Image: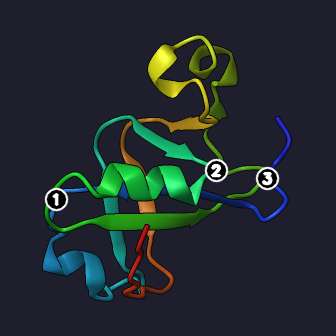
């Protein structure tokens, strides 16, 4: 699988409030958290915004990926499933750690 040129994928969540510990630097100098389930992402920020807009506390992760820390591209499945036909989906295994590098609040109108 080729990496996206901008090396970014997106994850949209709604109705999930991240714990305070996610935002605080721990004793190892890192902040973030663990996704305990299988995590799906997309190359489309628009798709992530759609997923995050269905409830309260909309959250979008912009995830920088590389050759080692990228999910498996399942285009062959996503183009055959009617609900995901237009999306390029990358799946990450369970217990995947997010290392938060920066955060920003943005307004998305659309």
- Mark 2 or mark 3, which is nearer the start of the sequence? 3
> Looking at the picture, does residue 53 appear above or below residue 85?
below
Cα gap from disc 1 to disc 3, whole angstroms: 28 Å
Q: Residue at x 72, y 50 (%)?
A: 68
Residue 45: % across, % down: 55, 59
Q: Quadrant of residue 52?
A: bottom left
> Looking at the picture, does residue 85 appear above or below residue 91?
above
Mark 1 lies on residue:
16
> Looking at the picture, does residue 80 appear above or below residue 103?
above
Residue 4: % across, % down: 79, 53
Mark 3 lies on residue:
4
Categorize mark 2 by other alpha carbons within 10 Å: few (<14), some (14-19), many (20+): many
Q: Is residue 51 left or right of residue 41?
A: left
Q: Residue at x 41, y 74 (%)?
A: 109
- Mark 3 or mark 1, which is nearer the start of the sequence? 3
Mark 2 lies on residue:
43
Find out whether the residues at labels 3 and 2 contact each other: C-beta distance under 8 Å: yes
Residue 102: % across, % down: 48, 86
Task: Give the secondary structure at mark 3.
Answer: loop
């Amino acid at each position: 699988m080729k990496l996206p040129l901008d090396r970014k994928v997106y994850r949209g969540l709604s109705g999930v409030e991240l714990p305070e510990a996610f935002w605080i630097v721990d004793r190892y100098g890192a902040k973030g958290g663990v996704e305990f389930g299988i995590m799906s992402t997309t190359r489309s920020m628009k798709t992530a915004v759609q997923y995050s807009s269905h409830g309260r506390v909309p959250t979008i992760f912009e995830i920088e990926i590389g050759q080692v820390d990228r999910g498996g591209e399942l285009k062959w499945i996503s183009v055959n499933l009617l609900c995901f036909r237009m999306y390029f989906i990358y799946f990450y295994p369970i217990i995947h750690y997010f290392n938060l590098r920066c955060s920003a609040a943005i307004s998305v109108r659309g």
